[in-house]
Every structure is written in C-alpha cells, then in structure tokens.
C-alpha cells in the first residue's frame, strides 16, 4: 500500500522537482530539487526545505500533478516538533502559555480597545446570531474594525484560544495540536448552536471549511462564510454605501500565503473591493501564486530560537522592496495575521510606504474616520517591545510542547502583572531617537546573521 501523509498524495508525485525549483524562496536547481524532495518523501535529512521554507504554499500550485507537496513539508516539520518541541520564543503566540502576546498587549491597550475586546470575548452567541470571528491578530489591532458600522451586520466574537482554528500552528506543522483545536472549536460552535459564521481572514476560513473536515476528521454543521465575497456583494447591492469613493489612492496588494489555497479562490474579491473604493492597483513583481510571505512563515523553519525575529523581518524586507518598487502610495493586506508583522517590519525598516488593512480602506471609502497612522505606529512599537521582552526571557527557557489548548480564565491571561522590564523597554522605545537607533541596530544584526 502507498504510504500517505495527512494531505500529501505520494502516489501522484513523480519527483519532477518543479515544486522546489519554482519556489519563489528556494529556487533550487532542478536536479537538486528532485534530490531534496526525494529525501523529504523518504524521511531523510533535509538540506534545504525544512530550514528555508517560508510556508508560502506556492509549491502546491506549481505541482503539475496536484500532489500537495507543501503538506509533506508540514508532516516533516511535525516530525521535528515531536522530537524537539517548539522554540521557547513561540510561547508568545500561544494563548495558553504565560506570558503571551495577548496577555501583554493588555498593558498597552486604550480603554476603548479594552471595552471592545471585553464585549467580543464575553458575549455568548444565540442561535439566530450571525457570528463574526474577530480573530487572534485583529485582537492586537482592534481599532481596525472596532467602532465601525460594518459590525452592525454581525455579533463580533473574539475567542483567542480557538487559535484561529489553528491556522498559524498548521502553517508551522503542528498538526497534532491543530487536530485538538479542531475538536475544541467544534464544541464551541455546536454549543452556540449558530448557523452562519463570517470569517474575515482567508486562513481561518480555509482551516474551518477545508482543513478540519478533510485533514483532521472534524466536520461542522455551520455555514462558514468568507468575508470578502460577502463584503463585495454588499457593496455591489448598495447595502454598504461608499460616499467617499473614489479615494484616489494607488495601492499595491499583499497576497497572503493562505490566499493560494484551492487554486487562489481568495485573490479576486479584495482587488475588486479596492477598485470600488477608488484605488488604482499597482501590482508587485510577485503576486498571486508567486507571492512572497509577509515574513511570519519564516518562523516555521526555525533553526535557532534567537534568530527567529531576524529571519522573519529578513523575509519581510523582500516584500517591502517589491511594494516600494511599484511606486504605490500604500501596501494593502487583506489578512489580519499579516498586518501586525507588516507594521513591525515597516517601522524596523523605516519604510515610508503606508500600510493598511483592507477593512480600513473600506471604512475610509464609507466616510468613517480612522486615526491613521498614529494608532498603527504606536501598536507596532508595543508589539516590537513585547517581542524583545519575550526574546530576552526565552533565552532562559527550553523548548516546549503545547499541552493545553484551552486557557484557564482564572489565570492572569487578561490581568497582566507589572512586567517592569517590558514597561521599561516600551518607555525607551517611546522616544523617536531611540526607535531610529533600535531599528538601525536591528537591521545591522539581521544582516550579520543572514550573511555569515
């Protein structure tokens, strides 16, 4: 019998090597690509893929036989996780570990943001509600959608220990943990007894509608609705009016990694939405199936804990170079998971291009006021401070295994302590000169690490 991993079709693969040869990151010579993929199939030592892959998923689209080569890489990363655990720094994106980024961001949230999040986290949906899943990473930038009339159509819900369905864990190969999250998420949805769930992030929509039922064996009775087709239809029908369109902006679009699944079903609607907002689109050199990762995916192929932030921003640098080369006024992301890294990268790279979430562009076209860019700049440095703090404390911790997927509401996840070192770091980064100096030191260290 042919051995099969979770979603990789070994019987379809003829070891042509095109997946790794056409990869926008690795670009291996064809013979080398064939050898590398054969080693992955046989479970032998990987020379390139497991330390260079940014989990951008392009390889699945390049495969002429639809064998899903990316899923084999996920399986091999899962094998590594079973042997060595996750890096200590990864605790900061685990809502059941202390401290984590959601716990620490509470130190810096405004009172208005805290009120929004409290409402989103504490509301228990009723059967007739249409749920809007805010998502783990929108939680970090709640002002993107908080206070908008767009939320009048839904009941916004924020359950960070749904881990966005395990989307960012799946991308790193933590497949066993994702399976547990799928089972827990089903309990949540069935307990609410809701019918319709609108999901603003492509990654999460794909995870709930495809990965959980087809790869994890967990099916739902809910109707999962992708936000951008829903939004475009509302705009076309006039239910959502855009009195301020055209905005007369030239924008370039970041196609996130998960936008590539199912042959790119998520690519077109965001572009049409932006055009209807009055935006002219200047495309980057690598878009759609060739699009580069925002940088987050580089953390999946980690080798050393200390280098993870530098690896991530190094990949993000490529995205900003492409965006700036278009001459566009702004870089627009339609993924909430990418937006916090794009903003961190923008500040660390001292880029001048504006960065928006697509919801913010729509809100401006609707005539709503957003506090741009002040809110984003402040939050970017809040997050940079948290990552620095987490990196420092991770130096004294060991690799770990994710054992708990549901947070205990009695613990201090949303009642953070003092964390004086974190507050000191953030206070220092409150000064423009300190931020400029830090950004330049960061870039210098990043270049040293990547070129040695």
Image (tube, rainbow, N blue to C red):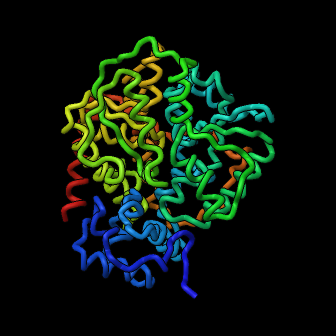
Q: Is residue 196 visible?
A: yes
Locate residue 375, reporting x and y percent: 42, 25
Locate residue 147, reporting x and y percent: 57, 20
Q: Is residue 378 visible?
A: no
At 50% from the left and 67% from the top, the residue drawn is 399
Residue 130 vertical placement versus 6 (above, below)? above
At 24% from the left and 53% from the top, the residue drawn is 445
- 338 to the left or right of 351: right
Locate residue 61, reporting x and y percent: 39, 60
Locate residue 328, reporting x and y percent: 24, 30
**Quadrant of the image occupied by residue 378:** top left
Front residue (pair 24, 447): 24
On-image quarter of the C terminus: bottom left
At 36% from the left and 37% from the top, the residue drawn is 343
Count of numbered circles in the view: 0
- 67 to the left or right of 308: right
Front residue (pair 52, 26): 26
At 45% from the left and 36% from the top, the residue drawn is 269
């Amino acid at each position: 019998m042919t051995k099969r991993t979770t979603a990789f079709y070994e019987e379809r693969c003829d070891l042509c090597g095109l997946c790794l040869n056409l990869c926008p990151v690795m670009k291996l010579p064809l013979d080398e690509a064939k050898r590398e993929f054969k080693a992955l199939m046989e479970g032998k030592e990987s020379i390139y893929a497991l330390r260079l892959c940014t989990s951008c998923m392009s390889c699945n689209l390049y495969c002429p036989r639809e064998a899903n080569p990316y899923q084999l890489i996920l399986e091999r990363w899962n094998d590594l996780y079973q042997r060595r655990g996750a890096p200590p720094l990864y605790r900061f994106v685990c809502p059941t570990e202390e401290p984590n980024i959601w716990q620490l961001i509470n130190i810096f949230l405004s009172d208005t943001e805290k009120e929004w999040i409290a409402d989103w986290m504490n509301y228990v949906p009723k059967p007739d509600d249409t749920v809007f899943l805010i998502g783990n990473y929108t939680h970090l930038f709640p002002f993107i959608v908080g206070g908008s009339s767009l939320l009048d159509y839904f009941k916004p819900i924020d359950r960070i220990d749904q881990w966005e369905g395990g989307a960012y864990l799946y991308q790193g190969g933590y497949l066993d943990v994702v399976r547990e999250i799928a089972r827990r998420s089903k309990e949540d949805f069935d307990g609410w007894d809701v019918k319709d769930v609108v999901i603003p992030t492509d990654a999460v929509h794909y995870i709930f509608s495809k990965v959980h039922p087809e790869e994890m064996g967990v099916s739902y009775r809910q109707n999962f609705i992708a936000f951008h087709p829903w939004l475009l239809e509302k705009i076309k029908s006039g239910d959502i009016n855009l009195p301020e369109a055209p905005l007369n902006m030239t924008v370039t679009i970041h196609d996130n990694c998960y936008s590539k699944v199912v042959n790119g079903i998520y690519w077109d609607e965001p572009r049409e939405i932006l055009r209807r907002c009055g935006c002219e689109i200047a495309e980057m050199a690598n878009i759609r199936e060739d699009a580069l990762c925002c940088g987050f995916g580089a953390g999946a192929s980690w080798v050393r804990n200390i280098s993870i932030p530098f690896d991530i921003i190094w990949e993000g640098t490529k995205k900003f170079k492409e965006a700036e080369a278009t001459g566009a006024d702004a870089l627009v992301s339609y993924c909430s998971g990418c937006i916090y890294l794009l903003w961190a990268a923008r500040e660390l790279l001292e880029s001048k291009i504006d960065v928006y979430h697509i919801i913010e562009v729509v809100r401006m076209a609707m005539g709503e006021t957003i506090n741009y860019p002040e809110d984003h700049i402040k939050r970017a440095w809040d997050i940079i401070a948290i990552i620095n703090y987490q990196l420092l404390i991770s130096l004294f911790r060991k690799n770990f295994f994710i054992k708990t997927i549901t947070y205990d509401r009695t613990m201090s996840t949303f009642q953070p302590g003092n964390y004086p070192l974190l507050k000191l770091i953030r206070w220092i980064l409150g000064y423009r000169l300190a931020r400029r100096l830090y950004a330049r030191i960061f870039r210098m260290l990043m270049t040293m690490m990547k070129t040695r």
